[in-house]
Image (tube, rainbow, N blue to C red):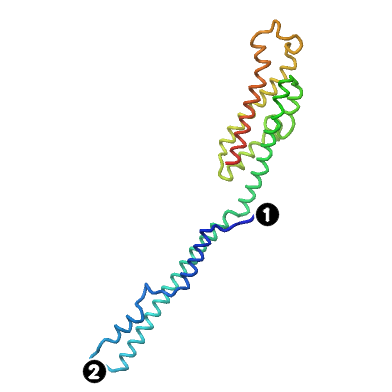
């Protein structure tokens, strides 16, 4: 996978501004040359020699230059420090661990989304009372990995929760959603299985209790809706 990093505009502008500041001579931290000469050329007693006055002026100018160089050096160090911070922040988001976590999340999210799409065909099968076909969908991966008791199914949503947590997502929310999805998918399979042997299938509703009739028609629909809601929630947690 190729990842392209684009510099934030604000960071680039800040670096450019700091670069020009670094190149600009300092005038605010040391006296100007004009002020230096004004102070150093004040009248002195006639007994003071010209060479001493000249030497003092040179020493003071050297001192001012040294202070200006120190200020410039300090400013460059500050620029380097801020630049390093910006670079480290920019590249921290592209570290190998972060990229690996994003790739894992993308792969596992695609499996959960595919499992959710498998349920789209169930309502039409319920209406036609094709219970074997409903169960055939439920036992096909990756949907089967969300609820059956195989070793793989026990790990799919657990691993999904761990990956979501590794990128700052709601790991606990995924684990709770896993329990919801597992429970309702099992109940959906149970409802479809029971309806295969329900006497209403062969004898009709004559003489059947209201609860038996309700269970035959309502349980598969209710469990399908609950299963869809649980998987939709899991998909949403992986995208946040």
Mark 2 highlights which residue? Answer: 47
Q: Secondary structure at mark 2?
A: loop
Which of the two residues, 67 or 43, is positioned nearer the viewer here? 43
Q: Quadrant of residue 92?
A: bottom right
Residue occupying image coordinates x 63% and y 47% = 102
Quarter where residue 60 is shown: bottom left
Residue 81 got which mark? Answer: none
Q: Looking at the image, which residue is at 63% across and 51% down?
A: 99
Q: Is residue 66 above or below residue 6?
A: below
**Image height of 88 relative to 180, above or below:** below
Q: Which mark is residue 2?
A: 1
Displayed quadrant of residue 216:
top right
Residue at 51% in and 60% down: 85
Earlier sequence position, callout 2 versus callout 1: 1
Could you say where residue 172 lies in the image, as x and y percent from the top left? 56, 36
Position of residue 184 measured from the top left corner of the image (x, y, whole percent): 64, 25
- Residue 78 position within the rendered picture, expressed as x and y whole percent measured from the top left: 46, 66
Relative to 37, 137 lies left or right:
right
Horizontally, is 211 left or right of 81 in the view? right
Secondary structure at badge 1 equals loop
């Amino acid at each position: 996978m190729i990842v392209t990093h684009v510099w934030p505009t604000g960071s680039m502008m800040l670096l450019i501004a700091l670069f020009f500041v670094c190149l600009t001579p300092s005038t605010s931290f040391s006296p100007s040359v004009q002020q230096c000469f004004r102070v150093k050329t004040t009248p002195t007693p006639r007994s003071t020699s010209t060479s001493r006055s000249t030497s003092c002026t040179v020493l003071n100018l050297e001192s001012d230059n040294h202070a200006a160089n120190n200020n410039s050096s300090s400013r460059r160090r500050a620029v380097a420090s801020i630049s390093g911070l910006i670079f480290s922040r920019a590249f921290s988001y592209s570290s190998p661990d972060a990229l690996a976590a994003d790739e894992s999340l993308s792969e596992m999210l695609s499996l959960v989304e595919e499992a959710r799409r498998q349920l789209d065909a169930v309502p039409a099968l319920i209406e036609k009372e094709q219970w074997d076909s409903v169960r055939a969908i439920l036992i096909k991966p990756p949907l089967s990995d969300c609820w059956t008791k195989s070793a793989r199914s026990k790990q799919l949503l657990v691993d999904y929760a761990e990956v979501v947590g590794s990128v700052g997502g709601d790991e606990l929310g995924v684990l709770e959603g896993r329990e919801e999805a597992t429970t309702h998918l099992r109940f959906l399979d149970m409802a479809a299985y029971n309806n295969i042997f329900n006497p209403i299938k062969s004898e009709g509703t004559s003489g059947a209790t209201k609860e038996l009739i309700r269970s035959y028609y309502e349980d598969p629909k209710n469990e399908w809706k609950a299963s869809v809601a649980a998987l939709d929630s899991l998909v949403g947690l992986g995208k946040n």
